[in-house]
Image (cartoon, rainbow, N blue to C red):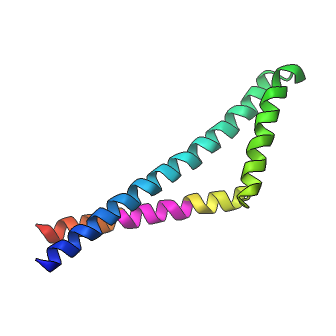
Amino acid sequence: MTRLDSVEKENAFLRYEYTVLEKELKIAELEAQCKKLRILFRKKFPDRSISMSYEAEERKMEIKRRDGNKSDLMMKDEVQSRKLRYDLLMEQIGNVRAEKH
């Protein structure tokens, strides 16, 4: 019975960790998409008056990013690291499921 409780606790933890990593990965992907869209917008509408508010938004995002002490390279490395952790957790969940059966 103790082994079952232990496996269930580990399974619950892995599910929680999976959810957290999935959300963090989604956020990183959305930030990358926003950056690409801003670049496309600037190319499409080069008029400074139109893009001024978007540049202000971008500066705010850059300040937030700097406050977190994360460069673009670090963000990419972090996304890759989270993807690897995600893959590892999925493998562990599969192993736990296989042990139950």
Foreground: 66 or 77?
66
Placement of the C terminus among the 4 image quadrants: bottom left
Q: Give the percent coordinates (x, y) of residue 55.
A: 81, 33
Residue 17: percent from left, percent from top: 40, 61
Work out whether 34 lies above or below 10.
Answer: above
- Is 42 on the left or on the right of 99, as rendered? right
In the image, taking residue 18 as reference, residue 31 lies left or right, namely right
Q: Which residues are magenta?
A: 80-89
Quadrant (top left, top right, bottom left, bottom right) of the N terminus: bottom left
Q: Is residue 59 above or below residue 45?
A: below
Q: Main secondary structure of the magenta part?
A: helix
Residue 81 spot, x, y in % from top left: 54, 65
- Quick check: is 27 in the magenta stretch? no
Based on the displayed image, in which of its 4 quarters is residue 79 positioned?
bottom right
Name the residue at 64% across, 44% down: 32
| Residue at x-position 55% and y-position 46% | 27
